[in-house]
Image (tube, helix red, strand yellow):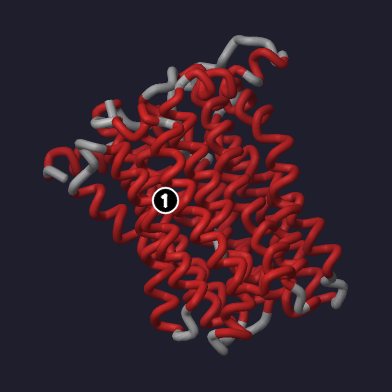
Amino acid sequence: MPEKSLSKLFAQRQFIRFWLARLVGITANQMLMVAVAWHMYDITSRAWDLGLVGLFQFVPALLMTLPAGHVADRLHRGRIFAACMLAQAAVALLLVSATHGGFASRELILAVSVVLGMARAFQMPAQQALTPLLVPPELLLRAIALSSSGVQAAIVCGPALGGVLYAAGATTVYVSCAGLLLLSCALTLTVHYRHQPSTLAATWGTVLAGVAFVWRAKILLGATSLDLFAVLLGGATALLPIYARDILHTGPEGLGLLRAAPAFGALAMSLVLIRWPLQRRVGGRLLAAVGVFGLATVVFGLSTHFGLSLLALAVTGAADNISVVTRQTLVQLETPNEMRGRVSAVNSIFIGASNQLGEFESGATAALLGPVGSVVLGGVGTVLVAAMWLRLFPALARRDRMV
């Protein structure tokens, strides 16, 4: 990135405050996810229950995200994000009490997963739609890449830190998460911008306007649905506790590193994209990146060596980051501000489906085919999806520039 552009971006104080709030909050969220997954596997030792954790997060997120997008267009987006951080802090404190009091159970973890899914439903549209209001349009591509680098840094540090702290006990992780989430909430409340609420009444037509917009914009539909099916099929996050303990023969520290590896690759790629943002052939590179994601997933599924597994996961993260930055930039650039909350909500549904529903799919297929069969089949399916999208969305494949 040219020095002048970089300096101008960092001069946007409200953006940097929100960037720090997201960094802290997502670090805590990733620590919490590692602890909840390992805690569940400690309690039940069943792949099916790991999948249920993802399903119990996905269903409320699916039901609430479209209304949450309308809320993000009407209310202050920073305060919505802060409220979501506060809700997750309350979950962490409840888990502290449950663990210390000896009543942590499978049912309780599934119940708090529902709360986490609801918080995510409101968090995602608000945070995605807020960034364009904090930077000028000419810096949006780099701002999204910088935001991605911060998010990925948090996803690198969070799982690793969560795994290390879990070795000292689940309570240690949950207390740390609560403190970080409260800090993120406080930082977000210092972010100010000119709020221009949508004046449209909450009707089914206004709530579903984001769906109609994405359906008409075939390039956005192709990019978001591509991410949905790629991560739905190729994601192996839910099975990492099984790989860590039963295939790679490591403990919670190793699980933390496995969870962090995709984020490490994504962080490296986001730094590349900050310095050399995609200028030409963005559609073709997006499809190629998804194909690489699928191939790297196959390698991870077949690997029994910890180092090779880390490398394969890092490659999946790097490839996925190209998809994330490309998709989010296209969504924000081609959506008017008064619609960004609702369109971001649609994008969040695709993201949530690919992650939470993908975790359930992984757990269910692993129960039938074993963890290796589940991951390898998903990776092959991802490569096939990239090839199919080349034909189904030719406008996306031919897209040359972001604008």
In the image, residue 311 lies at what x, y percent?
37, 73
Q: Which amino acid is tagged 1? A: Leu
In the image, residue 298 lies at what x, y percent?
47, 67
In the image, residue 17 lies at what x, y percent?
40, 44
In the image, residue 389 lies at what x, y percent?
44, 39
Q: Residues within 10 Å of mark 1 (few under 14, many from 20)?
A: some
347 relative to 258, above or below: above
Residue at (58% x, 56% y) in the render: 181
Front residue of 223 and 262 = 223
399 relative to 2, above or below: above
Residue 118 visible = yes
184 relative to 398, above or below: below
Residue 51 is drawn in which quadrant?
bottom right
Residue at (41% x, 28% y) in the render: 219
Residue reaching furthest left?
Answer: 3
Residue at (47% x, 61% y) in the render: 155
Front residue of 48 and 93 = 48
Residue 180 is drawn in which quadrant?
bottom right
Residue 326 is drawn in which quadrant?
top left
Residue reaching furthest bottom?
Answer: 249
Left or right, residue 99 beside residue 218: right
- Secondary structure found at label 1: helix
239 relative to 304, above or below: above
Circle 1 sits on which residue? 20
Residue at (45% x, 85% y) in the render: 305
Residue 31 visible = no
